[in-house]
Amino acid sequence: MTTSPLTDFEWTTGPVDTAAVRSSIIETGYAIVKDVVPVQLIQDLRDFWLGAFRDRASKAPAIWGPHLGEENRILFHQSGFDCLYRAYDFLWNPPIHDNTRKLGVELNRLRNAIAEFDPLAGETYAADGYGVYVTVSYYPPGEGWLRKHEDQTDMRRHWHFILPLTFKDRDFSGGGLYLIDRGGNRIDVDDTFEPGSVLFFDGELTHGVDQIELSETTHLGRMQMFAIPTFIERPSENDRMVEAISIGRFIKAKLRPFKHRITGLRSPAPSAKHFS
């Protein structure tokens, strides 16, 4: 049995049979592993993010193509593709919530072990732009949803993990996460989750979130945490980065070479001591 090393996973409850999870994903497209994360830690994350989404979220389009140096965000977006709150916690910034960041990084290392990647893949900026960021998604009561889709990828295994922070029949009564497995079967994943369980699945499979339904006793909605593998753009290549530049800053930047040329002409010639 190949297991994740306990020394690397201080924020999880114990070793995971990574070879068995890998085989399940290769065969069916997914695996649900029970008792991976302590229930008390899940409660800590849920309590923090319910308050953060209530008090700190701003309405803005989703960020699908982050750029290097992007600021952390807590957003609410609603479109023909989705309706949800999402936190964007980029690893080059201080964490929005320390426990969420630590757990997200640990579970990403576990995902890497399952996918047979380098253990630290995604934690640092790679030459091809590959990296991960930690996110929490919240599908609000009675309206949250995500259209079915398949994630685009390169030749590497585009496998995800998802840690649910709220649960069907306790926090919402209907709807939720589903995927289509390799046999063409629809799997209503939220029907089988227990607190502490983690889903690992192939992001190239069709998946989505049906609109969240509530009853008199279930009114919280659906919340999950995961680390999104993506390709992080250079700032000069990102349209949102360019759009954020004010006219004044743009003009100043364009005039900078002329300023340097003028001040350079007025500067004294370097003496020999500069090169000794």
Image (spheres, helix red, strand yellow):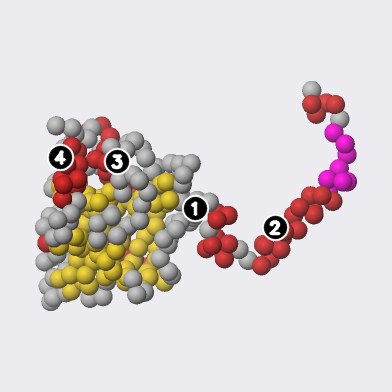
The three-letter code of the residue at mark 2 reads Ala
Q: Evaluate if marks 3 and 4 touch, with contact meaning CB atoms under 8 Å apart.
A: no
Q: Position of residue 127 (x, y in %)?
A: 48, 41
Q: Position of residue 199 (x, y in %)?
A: 20, 51
Q: CA distance from mark 4 to mark 1?
A: 35 Å
Q: Name the element at disc 1.
A: loop
Please report the residue visible at 85 percent of the width from the left and 26 percent of the height from the top. Answer: 272
Q: CA distance from mark 2 to mark 1?
A: 21 Å
Mark with earlier residue (3, 2): 3
Please report the residue visible at 18 percent of the width from the left and 70 percent of the height from the top. Answer: 175
The residue labelled by disc 2 is 253
In front here: 6 or 160?
Answer: 160
In front here: 64 or 96?
Answer: 64
Which mark's residue is nearer the viewer, 2 or 1?
Answer: 1
Against 185, is 117 above or below? Answer: above
The range drawn in magenta is 263-270
The three-letter code of the residue at mark 3 reads Asn
Asked where in the image residue 135 lies, by quadrant, the reply is bottom left
The three-letter code of the residue at mark 4 reads Ala
Q: Name the element at disc 4.
A: helix
The residue labelled by disc 1 is 233
Determine crowd level at label 4: few under 14, some 14-19, many 20+ residues with C-alpha closer than 10 A.
Answer: some
Give the total of numbered labels: 4
Q: Evaluate if marks 4 and 2 touch, with contact meaning CB atoms under 8 Å apart.
A: no
The residue labelled by disc 3 is 112
The three-letter code of the residue at mark 1 reads Glu
The answer to whether residue 106 is left or right of residue 59 is: left
Can you say which quadrant of the picture contains the N terminus? Answer: top left
Mark with earlier residue (4, 2): 4
The residue labelled by disc 4 is 20
